[in-house]
Structures are given as C-alpha cells and as structure tokens.
Amino acid sequence: MDNYKVSSFTKKLVDSKNMKPPFKPLTKAEEEIMQVLWKLNKAFVKDIVDELPEPKPHYNTVSTIIKILTDKGFVDFESFGKSNRYFPAVKKEEYTKKSMKQFVKKYFEGSYAGMFSFFAKEKDISIDELESILKELKKETPKN
C-alpha cells in the first residue's frame, strides 16, 4: 500500500479494526431509552416501557428502538429463551463527553470559553456557578 495513493475512505476500511466508529448522536427517542437503560443497568423491554413517562409508547415501538440501538452499538443483550435482557454497551459518561464535545464544536466553534460566555450573557449561569467550575478545574489541573 505504501507505493500506491490510497483514498482516506480506503484507509478507513483497512484500519477499521484499530479505529473506533465515528460518534453518532442519538435521536430524542433513542436517548430517552438509553436514559432508562443507564438507570436500570439491565432490563427487558417491558421494564423499559414501565419506566417511560406517560403517554407510554407501545411495546413494539420500544422494541424497534432497542433494535436500532443494538445495531448502532449502544445496547447489547443476553438471551433467556425467546426473551432478551438489554444493557448499555456505552457508558453514560462516555456518551455525555462525546455529545458535549460535538455540541461545543457545532455551536461554539469548539470553544468552551465561548459556551460559558454565552450562558453568562444569557444569565443562565451565575458567577457562583462559574467560580465553582473554575475551582473544579483548578483541582483537576496538575501542578508542575
């Protein structure tokens, strides 16, 4: 491959075993199901339906969304005869981190300072909250 010009698409195919799939945000319905699964850790479709707010979606609707989440790699399952018990394949913290990075990149040109500035200007975040965030950042930043 070194002697040939290879497209980035081909490189992705060749290196796909070493690469993580690109982050794909969840739809509102998918995220609602994931929130329940993150809360319950393991659940059958009926358990998930029971945890959803009114008006509850139909069992088949939830089952279809879980199938999509399984295909996307967000959910896995273990079989018990004809029934499957589902569990998250992606940690909530991992999804939150990637979602927030994508959000900041999309709306604030990748600038967290720009995001905080926006919320401060809109009065959606107080000075006390900003100072608390700054304290947390200072705790986590290693000192040389």
Image (cartoon, rainbow, N blue to C red):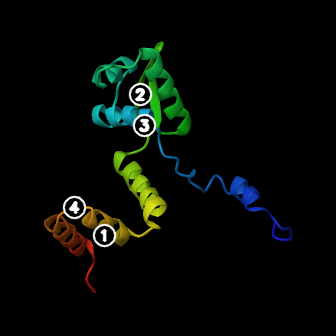
The amino acid beneath tag 4 is Ile
* Residue annotated with mark 1: 117
The amino acid beneath tag 1 is Ser
The amino acid beneath tag 3 is Lys
At horizontal 52% and vertical 47% (from top left) the residue drawn is: 24
Element at label 1: helix
Element at label 3: helix
At horizontal 73% and vertical 61% (from top left) the residue drawn is: 8
Q: Which of labels 3 and 1 is toward the front?
A: 1
Q: Residues within 10 Å of mark 3 (few under 14, many from 20)?
A: few
Q: Which mark is residue 28?
A: 3
- Do callouts 2 and 3 mark residues in contact (Cβ within 8 Å)? no
Left or right, residue 24 beside residue 129: right
Element at label 4: loop
Between marks 2 and 3, how big is the CA–CA gap?
Answer: 19 Å
Between marks 2 and 4, how big is the CA–CA gap?
Answer: 37 Å
* Residue annotated with mark 2: 86
Between marks 4 and 1, how big is the CA–CA gap?
Answer: 9 Å
